[in-house]
Image (tube, grey):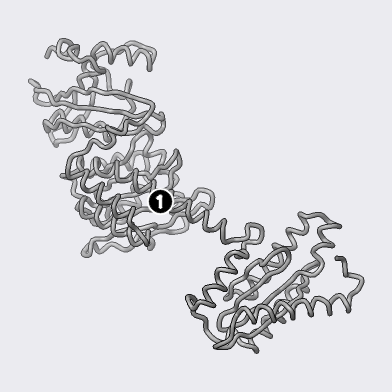
Amino acid sequence: MEFDRLINGYKAKACVMSVEKFPDGSYGNIRIAAGNRAHCEDMMNVMHRPFIPNSPYEEYLPQNKNFEDFCYRSAFLGQPLHSYVSLPQMGLWLNMFLLPLESDEENIGYCIYSYEVTPNADLEQRSSLSADTASAVLKTCIKLRGSNNIHNTFNEVMEDIRKICGSLHCCILLVNKDTRSCNVFCEALAPDSGLPPMSNLISDDFFDITQTWDSTLGDSTCIIIKDQRDMEWLSSINPLWADSLIHENVKSLVFFPLRYNGDTLGYMWVGNFNVDNTVKIKEALELTTFFLASEIANYQLMQKLEILSSIDMLTGVKNRNTMNNTVDEIVSGKRKMHYPYSVIFADLNGLKRVNDEEGHIAGDQLLISAASILRGVFHDGEVYRAGGDEFMLIADGLGAEALEARVKQLCDQAATTKYVHFAVGTCIVNEGEDIRNAMHLADERMYADKNEYYENHPERKYR
């Protein structure tokens, strides 16, 4: 075939791909049979060596299983294909077209590969989808934007994706490299799948498997396992992961990383899917995962902001703002309490002395130790740092006798430390009584306890 004359009619970068087909229907060598002037110039600029026709494609282009599948589909199944994908390791975007060509060779198929590489994403290209794919992605976006319960909504989205893909299982797994942990964010299982929830499969060493995924993805936007041959390929480069899939009877898989601003938040996969719709599934999920990652990143940001606004960052207990909100909820009846319950104020004796004599780092450590003891003793209550060296606790359902035992336990544990010593004031709240009055009484009793302490130990008074 006169490839040079054919391909030189293209102004864009273009080349002819040849694909070898085996008797069992699988493909073998994929080569670049010919390239036009723009392609040859691009190869010289990128590879710094001239293009040689009929070379294996991986000598000039990144080796990619999805690209190979597209070449096979175009060359032998006669499918014209288009894809617009990111190349994450290169920080580039690839706009590619494949057009099937007639072949006069029984076991060799051909297609034209035309491509453009840019440093920035083209929004028009990203949104250029088939009507049914666009509808599915739009439905996902509307669900996510109108959500009041993000976990319920994501589970609904997973079920939608599972049905679109004709799969048995769809799941999003979030990964935290700092804590070396992973957790199931949402998932959907077909009613007759017989598969256990993903959370049942996460063992202590499962995080180690997740750490192999990025290297397996390489510069691909996703991994698609359609058949036994693809699973054998996965086994050859990542036997640990492949063995875990085989063990769980996963025969086909679509696997996408969830990336946002260069960070990998987690991964989404669709297991045992309808392989006849592979191309459409890939098209739909490439854009859907972009929105899913964005929503998850926003959710995680809001969680961090909520923690920053409600937690005392030094001690890890709840802050005064949260304490005030809790009291308001109790007063208004939004929060139901189990009567009787206890209010406790605990103030540190001697913090100023530690700060002045040993420095504020030692003072901070004293506050951290005090908070840790309070949380341990009142493990079933809520601990708040009301301000400075003063803590307030609410122990729901804790009556007078149990409260007395807890306060003794608190003082006993403090006595085992070098500096921690609490001034404590308590008040029991019965049904019909106001928590604000109880807080006032507990605060007064705490200061009375503090004054008694310094009267008995005048040498320790230092403020």
Q: Position of residue 69 (x, y in %)?
A: 22, 34
Q: Position of residue 326 (x, y in %)?
A: 55, 71
Vertically, is 373 above or below 431?
Answer: above
Give the quarter of the image for residue 224: top left
Q: Position of residue 362 (x, y in %)?
A: 78, 57
- Seen in the image, is 404 located left or right of residue 102? right
The count of marks equals 1
- The residue carrying mark 1 is 296
Q: Secondary structure at mark 1?
A: helix
Vertically, is 361 above or below 7?
Answer: below
- Seen in the image, is 261 located left or right of residue 448? left
Q: Amino acid at mark 1?
A: Ile
Name the residue nearer the viewer: 385 or 263: 385
Give the quarter of the image for residue 433: bottom right
- Seen in the image, is 280 located left or right of residue 307? left
At 49% across and 56% down in the image, what residue appears?
303
At 53% across and 77% down in the image, what residue appears?
330
Q: Which residue is at the far right? A: 459
Vertically, is 95 above or below 342?
Answer: above
Vertically, is 34 above or below 399?
Answer: above
At 34% across and 29% down in the image, what residue appears?
93
At 44% across and 59% down in the image, what residue appears?
203
Report the quarter where the C terminus lies.
Answer: bottom right
Report the quarter where the N terminus lies.
Answer: top left
Q: Residues within 10 Å of mark 1 (few under 14, many from 20)?
A: many
- Seen in the image, is 446 located left or right of residue 301? right
Q: Position of residue 442 (x, y in %)?
A: 69, 80
